[in-house]
Amino acid sequence: MKTYKIALLPGDGIGRDVTEAAWTVLEKTAGSSGLSLEATRLPWSCDYYLENGSMMPADGIETLRSFDAILLGAVGWPRKVPDSVSLHGLLLPIRKAFVQYANIRPHRLLPGVQGPLRSDGFDILCIRENTEGEYSGAGGRVHQGTDNEVAVETAIFTRTGVERILRFGFEQARRRRGKLASVTKSNAQKHSMVFWDEITHGLAAEYPDVEVTSYHIDAMAARMVMAPESLDVVVASNLFGDILTDLGAAIQGGLGFAASANINPDRSAPSMFEPVHGSAPDIAHLGIANPIAAIWSGAMMLEHLGETAAAEKVMAAIEATTVRGIGAIPGKDKTDAITASVLSELG
Amino acid sequence: MKTYKIALLPGDGIGRDVTEAAWTVLEKTAGSSGLSLEATRLPWSCDYYLENGSMMPADGIETLRSFDAILLGAVGWPRKVPDSVSLHGLLLPIRKAFVQYANIRPHRLLPGVQGPLRSDGFDILCIRENTEGEYSGAGGRVHQGTDNEVAVETAIFTRTGVERILRFGFEQARRRRGKLASVTKSNAQKHSMVFWDEITHGLAAEYPDVEVTSYHIDAMAARMVMAPESLDVVVASNLFGDILTDLGAAIQGGLGFAASANINPDRSAPSMFEPVHGSAPDIAHLGIANPIAAIWSGAMMLEHLGETAAAEKVMAAIEATTVRGIGAIPGKDKTDAITASVLSELG
Ligand SMILES: CC(C)[C@H](C(=O)O)[C@@H](O)C(=O)O
Ligand SMILES: CC(C)[C@H](C(=O)O)[C@@H](O)C(=O)O
């Protein structure tokens, strides 16, 4: 029997609620699929920080490295610990240390879910660069506190970083409907984004079967709302991908439905799976968070581990749940009720 | 009789079509409002560049300085001149030279227009910083063409620049429904965006009557689609405002309806009024561009000149047109037919 060692990082707030829900679904799926999932729960979080002075132990990254995959809930509780500490102490270092350079987020309407758009026939795969660019952290401030103060924030793009995420995008487009949208803002950011466009055009020659189009980020944001059905794979920088995937979550009915995978495509380190939503401290532990995004992220984990049949079982159970209206309307059903329905649909 | 000297900069593509349409409406309005508008047409554009080697004459900025306002169509025709040349040679230098630091864009549905959202009860005023930030142009590339290449793009924020746009936002909120949303990404961009947040919080004390909330750009993009009716005034950096206002255009039914003003609030130089849409070379001079965004921008110009009654006449004529379905459906009516209807509604 194949055994996978999974690090469970519930994190903060509703991260804990939805990770437990997802785990029960994954365990049951494993049982009926002839595989074994072994969880190790790691309590790293803002509470952990308040007790220990850091978001994870000094050897946290080394500990995580031995797992086959990481299932994360959500990180952050601003009233306890500033986001600049919590996110830079746990979520972001994992993405970078494990070179999880491809953040993949699927955007489509689950059956039974009504989104905010009149249009409902879209199926978009957003691929976000996850390790560099606008979130490099480089910058600083001078003349602090004076009228003369200046703050700079430097986006850093490497050829290696841009080429690998674009290549990943071309490969995904090839496996889907053959269309790749590359998102930049080269008319206003003439160093980084012109660089990105050049690399896109260079790679296009290697993928003659993929139809690639460049869009400016502003036009793409409008397109996701006006004509989402025209899009297949969308590849974007760290910041642009961040924005577009929240927009993608919105058009698919809300953050309760948006799943994501932080992938290390070379498999030189574990990949991490997490719902797009945050920790939502205001509704933490009330039992009302929608676990569907976390369960879907779990299905993406099974897929990444090569357990495609098991992943499909989970997706089918999610869809059989929402099509009956359960978990389909934000705020209506309790976490437990939605989870119970997915479990029973698993058969 | 009050006389205003207006520089007409039709620019490229449909910029020419819609600027002429807007001008006929403005002239007729002036006639019935006891004021006089004098147009000076300036042919600066990509065609001008191909003939003269620059987008405008060397003394272009000085020429424009003597006008009371500038009405611009659109700039850019990528197949003739790269955007990095045309935009940096005409549109962007005007915004910067005349310290038009407040780019104002109203987002609401005109009567008779069906947007892409199920929701229709929103009325948002986006205020975009227009002179610095992520579009400063600072940056460069090393090891060009090698595997080792790195491109950097530096966003530069000054206290003066951030404070004045936020103050402008607070003032606008005070005149509207008293709610200000300030948009950053301080959990991932810890220099520039934390700076912006600090200044926001500092100013909040001076405006106790304004309810100010900070949002991350990703959450704001989602909110504009999920709950646009919860927003009043939204203030954002150059890049974030650029993205949000295209999204705003999308939810109001498309770029054909999105007007904008590049305002110099100190009135030390002329302000500039332009539709949010670009030059759309593919439909240039076919007579099918929607002139409503340009006409609405003209109304914003009248308002800025202090001619509130005339501005209201134009808006009433636009609304009387769209409510009858004319110009309300993208691509349906011709430029001339829409303009004729607005003119006849002016009475
Ligand atoms: C919490 C934040 C740093 C994070 C990001 O921007 O990467 C989140 O918004 C996301 O999309 O995963
Ligand atoms: C054309 C481009 C440089 C411009 C901008 O980003 O400022 C446009 O998108 C706008 O929104 O006015």
Image (cartoon, coloured by chain):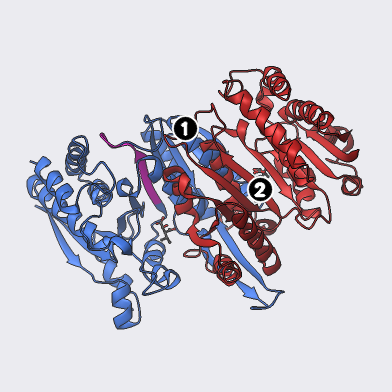
Chain colours: A red, B blue
Q: Chain of mark 2?
A: A
Which residue is at the front of the view, B267 or A118? Answer: A118
Which comes sooner in the sequence, label 2 or label 1?
2
- Which of the 4 image quadrants contains residue B73? bottom left
In the image, taking residue A17 as reference, residue B54 lies left or right, namely: left
Q: Quick check: B129 above or below B6?
A: above
Q: Which residue is mark 1?
A: A116
Are marks 2 and 1 in one subunit?
yes
Please name the residue shown 38% across and 57% down the image. Answer: B100
Range of magenta residues = B103-113
Specify whether residue B184 is in view. Answer: no
Give coordinates of residue B51: x percent, y percent. 29, 82
Which residue is at the front of the view, A80 or B63? Answer: A80
Q: Which residue is mark 2?
A: A104
Specify whether residue B316 is in view. Answer: yes
Asked if residue B110 lies in the magenta stretch, the reply is yes
Asked if residue B108 lies in the magenta stretch, the reply is yes
In the image, taking residue B1 as reference, residue B99 lies left or right, namely: right
**Ligand 1: which quarter?**
top right
Give coordinates of residue B174: x percent, y percent. 40, 34
In the image, taking residue A83 as reference, residue A200 lies left or right, namely: left
Q: Chain of mark 1?
A: A
- Which of the 4 image quadrants contains residue B317? top left
Give coordinates of residue A58: x percent, y percent. 91, 46
Q: Hey, what amino acid is under mark 1? A: Pro
